[in-house]
Image: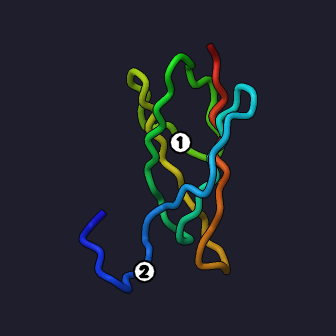
Amino acid sequence: VPSPSPGDKSTGMRIISDRLDGKIYVVNAEAQKGTTHTMDVYIKDWKPAKVENSKVISNVGNLLKLEVSFPSSDQKYVAKEVKIFLDE
């Protein structure tokens, strides 16, 4: 994060919630429309089999790095649900 000052607008991605639903790790995120962000996900004892609503940048050891793009919209902020399907 660059040096924010009081009153600055948020420009980063926010993680709204996350949960493990069986073998699917679900992350609900929000960011400004038309932006792209990276997300690091630490996964221990599982292997990511498939990812929805993001692009895998790298998968090294226990760290999965994802690129999440938020489309254009009439709204200032856009929500996205990223799903990581896991195998043991």
Q: Residue at x 65, y 56 (%)?
A: 80
Quick one: SS at disc 1?
strand
- State the image coordinates of residue 43 (x, y, percent, origin top left): 50, 27
Extreme residue toward the top, this view: 88
Identify the image quadrant of the C terminus. Answer: top right
* Residue underneath mark 2: 9
Q: Earlier in the sequence, mark 2 or mark 1?
A: 2
> Image quadrant of residue 78?
bottom right
Relative height, residue 84 to residue 82 (above, below) = above
- State the image coordinates of residue 56 (x, y, percent, origin top left): 50, 37
Q: Residues within 10 Å of mark 1 (few under 14, many from 20)?
A: some
For badge 1, the amino acid type reads Lys
Identify the image quadrant of the N terminus. Answer: bottom left
- State the image coordinates of residue 57 (x, y, percent, origin top left): 43, 38
- Position of 9 compared to 24: left or right? left
For badge 2, the amino acid type reads Lys
- Position of 7 compared to 45: left or right? left
Q: Residue at x 63, y 34 (%)?
A: 84
Quick one: SS at disc 2?
loop
* Residue underneath mark 1: 55
Q: Residue at x 56, y 71 (%)?
A: 33
